[in-house]
Amino acid sequence: MCTCKEQPALIEISNTHADFMSRLTQQDVGHWALLMSCPECNQLWRVDESVKYQPCYAVKISSRENWEEFDSESLIKEQMIENRGGLTQHYCMWSKCNFKKVKGSTLCVNHLWETGSRE
């Protein structure tokens, strides 16, 4: 049964990668990502290849055109902030950075991203 419409734009699928993929049809293969579609509603998904030490995400996309270049960075950054409980009132420790720190970190989400964090 299709649940695509109820799903958010970004889904963290690290623990359900195989199950999530089993409900979709592969359309194309890219660099560390797959273009998948729902056989019931035709919703397109850009799905990360499963990587051992990084979370995997599935992102709703609206077009096959340039699907590999779809930039999910802002969606993942929002998810990172949510996963960690939001932002603090204190500023990032990075020199001359004026962004608030992510809870449980000394860095803002942009500098966490630069360190390779995706969760």
Image (tube, rainbow, N blue to C red):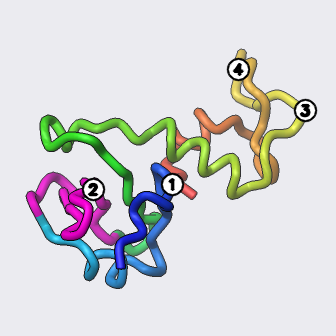
Mark 1 or 4: in front is 1
Q: Indicate whether 90 appears above or below 37.
A: above
Q: Position of residue 40 (x, y in %)?
A: 23, 69
- Farthest residue in the left direction? 28
Q: Which residues are magenta?
A: 27-50
The tag earlier along the polypeptide, 3 or 2, is 2
Q: Amino acid at mark 1?
A: Pro
Name which residue lies at 70% across and 51% down: 82
Give me the disc on residue 43. 2
Mark pair 3, 4: CA separation: 14 Å
- Quarter that holds the C terminus: bottom right
* x and y percentages locating residue 101 in the rendered image: 78, 37
- Closer to the chain start, of discs 1 and 3, is 1
Q: Against 42, is 72 above or below?
A: above
* Element on which disc 4 rests: loop
The answer to whether residue 45 is magenta is yes
Quadrant of the rendered image containing residue 45: bottom left
The Cα atoms of the two marked residues, 1 and 2, are separated by 12 Å
Residue that badge 1 annotates: 8
C-alpha distance separating marks 1 and 3: 28 Å
Q: Indicate left or right for 102 with 28 as reference.
A: right
For disc 3, the marked residue is 89
